[in-house]
Image: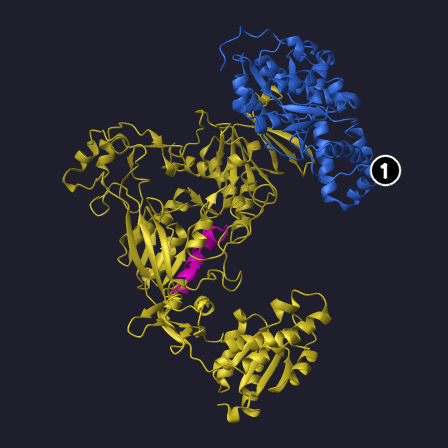
Chain colours: A blue, B yellow
Amino acid sequence: MKYAYYPGCSLRGTGRAYEESLLPVFKALGVEWQEIEDWNCCGATAYMAVDEVKSCVLAARNLAIAEKAGYSDIVAPCSACYLVLNKARHYVEESKAIANTVRRALKTANLTYNCKVKVRHPLDVLVNDVGLDRIKKRVTRPLRELKVVPYYGCQIVRPYSTFDDQANPTAMDRLLNALGAELVYYPLKTRCCGGSLTGTLPEPGLLCTYILLKEAIKRQADVMSTCCSLCQFNLDAYRDKIAAKWEPVEIPVVFFSQLMGLAFGLPAEQIGLQRGFAPMKPLPAPGVAA
Amino acid sequence: MDNNNEIRIGFYICHCGSNIAGMVDVADVAQYVEKLPGVALSRHYKYMCSDPGQELIQQDIKDHKLNRVVVASCSPLLHEHTFRQATEKGGLNPFFFHMVNIREHDSWVHTDRQAATEKAKALASAAIQRVAYHKPLEMKKVPIHPDVLVVGGGIAGIHAALTLANAGKKVYLVERDPTIGGHMARFDKTFPTLDCAACILTPKMSAVGSNPNITLWSYSEVAEVKGYVGNYKVTVRRKPRYVHEDLCVGCQECIKACVYKEPKFPDEFNEGLGKRKPIYIPFPQATPQVVLIDPETCLQLKLGKCKQTCVAACADRQAIDFHQKEELKQIDVGTIILATGFKTFDAKRLAAYGYGVHQNVYTALEVERLVNASGPTGGEVVLRDGQKPKAIGIIHCVGSRDEKTNRWCSRVCCMYSLKLAHLLKEHSDPATEIYNFYIDMRTPGKGYDEFYDKLLDEGVHFIRGRVGEVTDWAFTPEEEGKLVMRVEDTLAGYVRRIPVDMVVLATGLEPHTDAQAVRRMFNMSCGSEGFFLERHPKLAPVSTFTDGVFIAGCCQGPKDIPDTVAQAGAAAAEAMALIDKKYIEQEPNTAFVDETDCSGCKSCVPLCPYSAISFVEDKKKAVINEALCKGCGTCVAACPSGSIHQNLFEDEEIFKEIEGVLAYD
């Protein structure tokens, strides 16, 4: 099965390391994908708050393009894209009024959207389609002795928990476990990263970020693993400000796909590891494959 | 009775106050029916089921020489019996009456008055056509077996069994666990009086054990139920306890002698907080006072290798038998009372409260054992980590009143949370802070709200708000090493973080996981939430839709001990009402074989679900035992030669009814 791939803006900007690591990992596992043509903004964040329906139209255009190209699944790695595309699908299914507006708007571009394309998160694809057994087999450099905090953020489980438990998601836990990593119990796995507050109301926003980083350090983690470009950015990019306000919080924050790349033996620079502000300590010498 | 075969039908349409008349133009229907062939008179009346309504029918039968009666009103389930009686009092065979349901089937379910009136006319027309073909019939009487099966040995089953046994009835009490007592036996005190649960329960338990009218089968389950009201045939599976009940005297020498010097395995009765040996008795007052062996942990049963010190200790009583097998017992009973109880909500389903993750998060049932003098800590409140808590939070409504889990209120949690707050306070350092986190306080019961007031005076804190999370994530130095309860205090209007040492989850009540299987076995219904469904929520609260099967206690829905005992008594009384009548009147709607047409093909014989059909070899004809036939109609429909007929459902009656409803204009 070939997946439609929707990178969204962040994977080409601040979350570049996510794409740089995810695509090689897909390749290593034989997952086929094709970036959809002429994609546009998913309609996330501010726009969703200003005009929900127009935001839905934006999202639906991407889905319609994937549908037209004959795909049954579209992979959206950024949690915000994943949520908004899912939300658009729900809104169109549940509200006739929104469905009509979307249909009229898409018609002007000779597109139709029939809710046939499923919106998938890469964690869902990796754990449920590829399967942990295949991933385990591909591991050449198990992440033994690497203490990892699995941090999910809010958007992949709320409000739609399509593939994981809302209060206690475990897909990334299981995945990291398959890579041989040591999981750190982290009760804040779905707590807010500060979202866009870090830009608009820095004080409460940064407090959220600080809490997450501090708790990971307190629990003696070596690295935090995220699955959302905004979470990764918030946790990684404001360390100076946090240090000035509270205390230094030096712990690397990477995408789960980067850890997969490491475990698959891909070179660090080919999976964007050089991009983080807090560098990862070199892994212990490669062990025997699990 | 039919002079000159002339059919004279009396038709009555009931207003039912405004229940029917509000949606159906009853006068118009009466007028329409009056003109139908065979109708001698047609009336509408405010309440046909009232005494004057019934007298009207009786008087009309005499005055107008009626020989058929049709009443259009509510469901036959409610008043068919009433009107049949009125018809009989008027001097007619009660089966010359027919009922039309224009309430549940019409006025209550439609919103268009015109269309509802037309539908009432069509249904009335069908009944008028059919009733002319009714034949005189007699109710049949079937004797009832006087013995009763009570399933479940909690307080409900115990009370029902004792009530029946004290009235001289023979009772089989079947309990799944090795002892009776159910949940109540594990409670420390009972609200609001703070009676010791064991002190009031155990005398009843031993009364069950010693009552000659009660056959107690613990560690047993019902395997199969056949038959019908008055004559149930039940198979009970007796699980092997590897100890002969009749030989064991309960001295417990074998337990002392077990090769395991110390108890090693989680003790079910104490919710796994204590330990037991492979050979054990669930708790000191267990009834029956018989030990049992757990095959999962006993070395002899698991590995076939043990010194069998228990057998030596039992000596010449020889009660221990490693070769004991499961046994099936067949019994005949006339009535059944189901008191199978509930299970508590699995707290692990709510990950945010950390049960099973944080060791100092407890369920309420665990705390019942923790504060109990005969519990694993001797009544001292000592946590799993060996500490004594200085602050305790009790979360109400865990798995209740929650769209994500169970929507219903479990009814007992507010009160038992208050009780546990009181007991925890009593059993801890006086400086211990206790918080109750509630949505609403629900304390409706005799002395219940007064108990709540008492707790307020005792200095227990009450915080209105549903706890969002129990976490070991500390934000301030005071929170280090504590469990932090995050909650929106909806009275104070802000989000609070309250550090505690112990969290108690007031888990709600749920149907048993196998409630659906039990429902099917006893041919009952369940409500949408999975509790057994009563026949009528107000007027038949312990009856079910299966005659002779009654329900009591929490299997019907969450309730406290007083309500459970009241229901158990009611169920026993309902069973006795049937038994003491000595027979059951059954509808004469049975099937019969017209021997002239029967070809003896035998196709009906295996189809009958009640084994009522036999084949008479010398005549080469099928015969239906009227006492066994339940009138399901399967054989009638299946007979290739059309030689099986059914009373009240004869072909001409059915065809005329169809004609009446379709040809109505």
Instruction: List the single residue furthest toward the left.
Output: B316
Q: What secondary structure do most residues of the magenta stretch adopt?
A: helix
Tell me the quadrant of the picture where the C terminus of chain B can be found.
bottom right
Residue B207 visible (yes or no):
no
Task: Residue at 52%, 45% (x, y): give it.
Answer: B415
Residue projecting furthest to the bottom = B4
Going by the numbered disc 1, the residue's amino acid type is: Thr
Q: Nearer the viewer, residue A56 or B276?
A: A56
Count of all numbered marks drawn on residues in the image: 1
Q: B27 or A260: nearer the eye?
A: A260
- Residue B571 is covered by the magenta coloring: yes
Residue linked to disc 1:
A108
Q: Residue furthest right?
A: A108
- State the image quarter where residue B636 is shown: bottom left
Q: Is residue B246 left or right of residue B559?
A: left
- Label 1 crowd (10 A; few <14 / some 14-19 / many >=20): few
Residue A8 x/y as whole percent: 75, 24
Q: Magenta part of the protein: which range?
A: B549-575
Name the subunit of mark 1: A
- Residue B22 lies in the magenta-colored region: no
Q: Quadrant of residue A20?
A: top right
Could you say whether the residue bearing mark 1 is in a helix, strand or loop? loop
Q: Is residue B626 above or below residue B226?
A: below
